């Protein structure tokens, strides 16, 4: 008899261990698939794009830059987002940091909402959506007025999940209300919309708890949370912020996409992200003794796979765009043979940017007759925003500079900096334009800013030597060639 019982327990324990091991193996498999997919989408497919995006961003290690970011609600996310974006100077390093944050979001989703192990593949969905949010932009990044975008939304979700996890750990309802009030007042200027999102999660969570146990005390945080979301932004707008527009008080910290039919597609990942978080609340309020055995176990796997396919399909992909970015990098290094090489790789009809870059490069290396592209056979850039500004934003600065139209180069750098904010690429062309024009004190002004960055100090040090000793410019082949082009009046044909 005892022998039979012993065998029975032994069999049961063996079955339990095998199920546990199988579950752990599946979780490891999901993790491996996610990391491989994220690395492919970031380093291998979009590494060139992230490197370019970093050049159209900036982080300055100065008190002024910090205060400039904090002029608007959500300023800390902007500041931190810009800080991490600079690491895309090395696409592999920047991508590893970003993927690590996505994995942390997956972990926080599990513990914040108590997602059962069978449903944990769903915890990758917010991470995958955030991955899409940075791979979908394409040309839009040229004119997006959201500094730190590549990391700010990811950091916002991390803050939101951390605070929600802490909120749930508080057993006393009164303390929950106190924390909600405190976090809304302190969190809104730091995290903007994402502080409001956390308060909204508090309120919906309490409402679901009411439906679960019919305790009317849960209405206290629901009402207070709703009031906080509405009132706190109004208070800060009227008494604290003087630069922020009223239409942005509830969306501060979100990307500044247009609310129109053309750019609605850019909002889809964020809509899906917020809906997913609110749906996860269903796990948080379920009764612990209530079994989920009746649910289909293959659904989380299907959602996980569908999410990856969705990210792959809707990520921006355009051969001309890739060629334009590589050309811009080569032109900045005065490597015209590389520019011509990329033009030779173009399949199909090139954009105007490619035509202009190619023809200028072949003129510079003395082979204009070798596949000089016809500017009449062009297509518009594949983007959701108007095409004409794209031509100037993408190719205007290098073409104006290389053809000696220094004042036009400086003009468009200044125009774009006023409209879209300070960028490393703008500052570099402004420094070089000022040196070519022999305006050395003006060059010093912009070069000083670059010297306060992490990865452009070496570049700034090189040109600082020309600023301190202008006679050195007479021996620099690039500066001499640009000055010669300026005197000859070569046209860029923009």
Image (cartoon, helix red, strand yellow):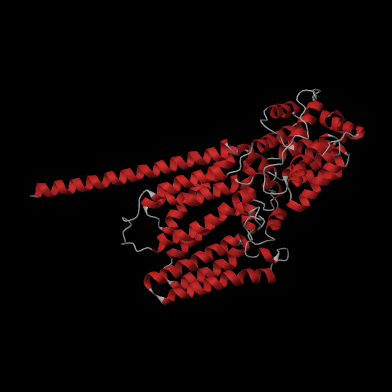
Residue closest to the eye, 180 or 357:
357
Q: Is residue 295 left or right of residue 139?
A: left
- Quarter residue 346 falls in: top right
Residue at horizontal 43%, vertical 64%? 169
Q: Nearer the viewer, residue 134 or 374?
A: 374
Q: Residue furthest front?
A: 377
- Residue 295 in picture, x, y percent from top left: 34, 55
The reply, left or right, for residue 230 in relation to residue 425 is left
| Residue 354 quadrant | top right
Percent of width and height locating residue 328 = 72, 36
Residue at the outermost right position: 487
Is any atom of residue 406 visible in this view? yes
Screen quadrant of the C terminus: top right
* 431 left or right of 212 in image: right
**Residue 158, visible in the rendered structure:** no
Query: What residue appears at the point 63 percent right and 51 percent down from the top-left corner?
Result: 149
Question: Is 342 drawn above or below residue 104 in the view shown?
Answer: above
**Residue 223: x %, y % from top left:** 51, 74
Residue at 43% x, 68% y: name it. 208
Counting from the top left corner in percent of width and height, residue 281 is at: 44, 61
């Amino acid at each position: 008899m005892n022998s039979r019982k012993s065998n029975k327990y032994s069999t049961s324990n063996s079955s339990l261990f095998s199920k546990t091991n199988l579950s752990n193996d599946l979780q490891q498999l999901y993790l491996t698939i996610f990391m491989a997919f994220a690395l492919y989408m970031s380093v291998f497919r979009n590494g060139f794009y992230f490197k370019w995006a970093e050049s159209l961003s900036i982080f300055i290690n100065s008190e002024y830059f910090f205060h400039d970011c904090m002029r608007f609600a959500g300023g800390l996310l902007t500041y931190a987002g810009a800080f991490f974006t600079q690491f895309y100077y090395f696409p592999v390093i920047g991508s590893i940091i970003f993927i690590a944050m996505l994995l942390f979001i997956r972990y926080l989703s599990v513990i914040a909402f108590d997602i059962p192990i069978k449903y944990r593949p769903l915890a990758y969905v917010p991470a995958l959506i955030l991955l899409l949010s940075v791979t979908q932009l394409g040309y839009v990044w040229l004119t997006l007025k959201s500094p730190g975008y590549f990391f700010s939304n990811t950091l916002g979700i991390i803050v939101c999940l951390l605070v929600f996890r802490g909120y749930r750990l508080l057993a006393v309802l009164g303390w929950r209300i106190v924390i909600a009030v405190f976090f809304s007042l302190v969190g809104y200027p730091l995290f903007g919309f994402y502080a409001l999102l956390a308060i909204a999660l508090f309120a919906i969570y309490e409402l679901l708890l009411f439906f679960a146990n019919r305790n009317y005390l849960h209405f206290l945080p629901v009402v207070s949370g709703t009031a906080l979301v509405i009132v706190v932004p109004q208070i800060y707008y009227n008494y604290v912020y003087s630069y922020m527009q009223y239409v942005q008080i509830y969306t501060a910290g979100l990307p500044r996409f247009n609310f129109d039919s053309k750019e609605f597609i850019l909002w889809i990942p964020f809509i899906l992200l917020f809906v997913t978080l609110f749906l996860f609340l269903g796990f948080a309020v379920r009764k612990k003794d209530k079994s989920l055995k009746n649910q289909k176990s293959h659904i989380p796997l299907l959602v996980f796979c569908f999410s990856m396919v969705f990210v792959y399909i809707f990520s921006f992909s355009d051969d001309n765009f890739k060629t334009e970015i590589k050309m811009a990098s080569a032109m900045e290094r005065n490597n015209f043979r590389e520019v011509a090489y990329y033009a030779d790789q173009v399949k199909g009809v090139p954009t105007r940017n490619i035509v202009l870059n190619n023809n200028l490069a072949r003129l510079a290396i003395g082979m204009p007759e070798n596949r000089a592209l016809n500017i009449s056979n062009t297509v518009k850039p594949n983007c959701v925003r108007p095409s004409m500004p794209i031509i100037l934003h993408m190719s205007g600065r290098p073409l104006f500079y290389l053809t000696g139209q220094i004042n036009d180069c400086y003009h468009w750098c200044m125009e774009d900096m006023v409209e879209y904010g300070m960028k490393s690429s703008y500052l570099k062309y402004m420094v070089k334009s000022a040196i070519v024009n022999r305006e050395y004190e003006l060059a010093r002004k912009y070069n000083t800013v670059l010297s306060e960055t992490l990865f452009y100090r070496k570049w700034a040090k090189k040109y600082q030597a020309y600023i301190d000793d202008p006679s050195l410019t007479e021996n620099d082949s690039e500066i001499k060639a640009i000055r010669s082009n300026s005197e000859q009046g070569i046209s860029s044909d923009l």
